Image (tube, rainbow, N blue to C red):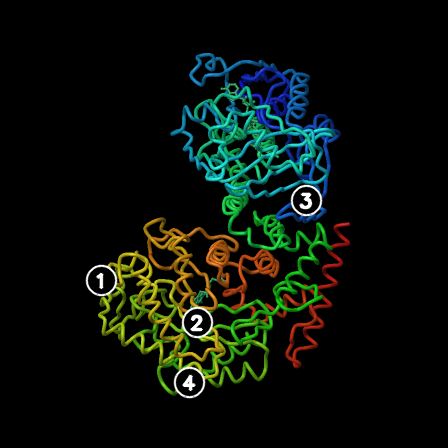
Amino acid sequence: MKIACIGGGPAGLYFAISMKLRDPAHEVHVFERNPRGVTFGWGVVFSDQTVENLMANDPKSARTIADEFAHWDDIDVHIRGECIRSSGHGFIGIGRMRLLEILQDRAAELGAVLSFESECDPDDPKWAEYDLVIASDGINSRVRDRFADAFGVDVDQRANRFVWLGTSKVFDAFTFAFEETDAGWVWAHAYRFAPDCSTFIVECSEQTWRGLGFDTLDQADAIARCETIFAKYLDGHALISNAAHLPGPAVWLNFRRIKCERWSHGKFILLGDAAHSAHFSIGSGTKLALEDAIKLADVLNRPALGQEAALFEYHAERSLEVLKLQNSARNSTEWFETLERYLHFEPLQFAYSLLTRSQRISHENLRLRDKDWLEGVERWFWERAGVTGKTAAPMFAPFRLREMSLENRITVSPMAMYSAVDGTPGDFHFVHLAERALGGAGLVFTEMTCVSPEGRISPGCTGMWAPGHVDAWRRITGFVHANSRAKICLQLGHSGGKGSTKLGWEGNDVPLDDGNWPVMAASDVQWSPVNQRPKAMTRADMDMVREQFVAAVRMGEEAGFDMVELHAAHGYLLSSFITPLQNRRSDDYGGSLDNRLRYPLEVFAAMRAALPPHMPMSVRISANDWAGDDGVTPDDAVAIAEAFARQGADLIDVSAGQTSTDARPVYGRMFQTPFSDKLRNEARVATMAVGNIYEPDHANSILAAGRADLVALGRPHLIDPMWTLRAAAALDYRDIHVPPQYLNGQAQLARNLKREAEAAAALRV
Ligand SMILES: Cc1cc2nc3c(=O)[nH]c(=O)nc-3n(C[C@H](O)[C@H](O)[C@H](O)COP(=O)(O)OP(=O)(O)OC[C@H]3O[C@@H](n4cnc5c(N)ncnc54)[C@H](O)[C@@H]3O)c2cc1C
Ligand SMILES: Cc1cc2nc3c(=O)[nH]c(=O)nc-3n(C[C@H](O)[C@H](O)[C@H](O)COP(=O)(O)O)c2cc1C
């Protein structure tokens, strides 16, 4: 094959090497616009896994690269005069220029032709001479822009500004240095990549960038200002730019996240940054470019495949890898963009939050890297929870809301069981809730318990409107208190326009075949075309429902509950006021967020006033309607949380969605936790995170990073009432209360899990 590569960065050069290795008969010509020896950027970091992949592909160049690596283990986080050092991170780095030299030499040795100072135009007729033209022309790819529609290009320009500098100061750790200036915070990502040289990336928000005058300063003055800001880290060494040759007025950039739906168009094939980009803060762009090159060379050299199938396989495999990395990179990018949120953390927690920002590194990963450091974090966490000198998983630390002390941070999320008769919880509820309390969770929520027969979702929903309900609930709370350390919270709600539907497993949100009762909501907006059109509530309806909530709170206290939660999420009655997707009112209860919140806040305040001051009260909200600016956004949710907190909410239970059938949720591991993080650290309220959290490691990572105060698990508890006890056994945590009847089982499980872990560790060695 006769192949042209437009761009002699890591992608183009490594592709040339990989093609020639597989078949020396290929003619590969690499065109690079820069002169030899000139490039942007400084060092790049790799993981061990990337090096293994390079070794397998071309041991010769991989060995040369590996011989030149700078290795370091530590990460230093400098903030407010403190340096938090953790170890075991195992980085390897190399200068970008040196990497390119190694790849250039190897490509030439294998017979590829390299032409420097060759600016390429995608419309140049010379491409007709080639079988394939590889667009390895980087993040600002001209080829990609020329055929943007064909490639399905999606560009997301991020908010912060950064500049990629170098310095002769040799850092002995990967260094994050955060400095406060009059115009806001500026920070550096710095690491050594050669015996005498380090990368030094400076980043800040757009506002700070302008405030510091970086928008008007020329390169030399901007660098001098950075030297002043970071003087204490540079020890008199200068910061240096090697981007002076780049076109454009400034060296400061906004990172652009690139995605392409398709990676080939005719004979043009995208490779590396031209096809995708990953934020520099997770340092994986070069790795992706090199691994793309290996895969593309692989598929093109399997003649049986045919070119179409080869390109299909290339795109299918690589785009999945890219997606994973871009997800982590997005978390990391957002962490730096929302830095203000974490600046009130103590330095140790700030560093933990930084290290776990991409959600690729968890609590247990950190234990493997630096056990002592992680145990220091755990001790700190327990100390803040009021227990000094204890080192154990954060999920087992106590938590207090008003006079209610929770034994640990795990809760059983509210879950409808559709098994009540006329609102009365029966034997099923007794066993279900009792079992989960015995299973070790600190707090057990009831399902949404409805304040009136008409406020039920289905005929099987539990209720709190009749004296018989109080007795039935008292039987349950009595057992929980007598036999476990768990506290029990009554979730109260009204179904609104989503009421009068079948039992969950007979059809979610589907109206009853017969016996439907009339429903009401904020407005007469149907949940879906098959649901009833609700009556828009009058003021008299609102008074009536508020009093039903107040009566239910009083009954809840009488029934022995420790806490009450108001359900104002998921499109039910109170949520139908909050979300603009359901609320079409033109009176004081519709329109602005303040208006939409007026009635839910009125109900909350009335309930709070009816509850004794020692009892805590929470509210569950949908922090994102998943409908863009048409619905409640996470920013709105901050205002919503603040408004409920002002009415005395002790905890915001941060759920999301289920407010419209048009919502487009983005699911994934811990997918709603970012909203809990945002509310907790912007509105400064206690929060509970929920949603696809299923491993102890998830819970510990969330809690230690200050992303929530409590962690709720729903579905995991449906299948395993003993989830918390099992986690205690797995983490060898002995201080959890185990019902005495179950002690032998707990001890056996702990022993077996320990043995399994030891066997697995022995195998790894
Ligand atoms: C601040 C910063 C820090 C980074 N840190 C890391 C890190 O630590 N680790 C890591 O793995 N990655 C890092 N990256 C990302 C990394 O630089 C890229 O992902 C990687 O270089 C991609 O390789 P590439 O060959 O696809 O593109 P590039 O390296 O950009 O190469 C493209 C080449 O094409 C040439 N070119 C462009 N247009 C034309 C044209 N029309 N004609 C001829 N030649 C052309 C360019 O001059 C360039 O040499 C960082 C990026 C930034 C911005
Ligand atoms: C069967 C079932 C019933 C549910 N019922 C309720 C409920 O009554 N009240 C409520 O606020 N959330 C309810 N939810 C939502 C859960 O509390 C939880 O937010 C959701 O399942 C996500 O958490 P998970 O991924 O841990 O399951 C229910 C979820 C399930 C699976």
Tell me the kind of residue under disc 2: Glu
Mark 2 or 1 closer to N-term? 2
Task: Say whether residue 694 is left or right of residue 500.
Answer: right
Q: Label 3 near label 4: C-beta < 8 Å?
A: no
- Give the image quarter of residue 749: bottom right
Q: Residues within 10 Å of mark 3 (few under 14, many from 20)?
A: many
Mark 4 or 3 closer to N-term? 3
Say the numbered circle drawn on residue 75. Answer: 3
C-alpha gap between disc 1 and disc 3? 56 Å
x, y percentage for residue 284? 59, 37
C-alpha gap between disc 1 and disc 4? 37 Å
x, y percentage for residue 241? 59, 25
Residue labelled 2 has its Cβ within 8 Å of some atom of ligand 2: yes
Tell me the kind of residue under disc 3: Ile
Tell me the kind of residue under disc 1: Asp
Q: Nearer the viewer, mark 1 or mark 4?
A: 1
C-alpha gap between disc 2 and disc 4? 17 Å
C-alpha gap between disc 4 and disc 3? 56 Å
Say the numbered circle drawn on residue 565. Answer: 2
Residue labelled 4 has its Cβ within 8 Å of some atom of ligand 2: no
Q: Quadrant of ligand 1?
A: top right
Residue holding disc 4: 470
Task: Say whether residue 333 is left or right of residue 658.
Answer: right
Task: Say whether residue 454 is left or right of residue 719.
Answer: left
> Which residue in the rendered view is the most extreme toward the front?
182
Residue at image coords 40%, 74%: 608
Tell me the kind of residue under disc 4: Val
Residue holding disc 1: 587
Residue at image coords 67%, 32%: 198
Q: Nearer the viewer, mark 2 or mark 3?
A: 3
Residue in the foreground of this view, choosing between 339 and 732? 339
Circle 4 SS class: helix
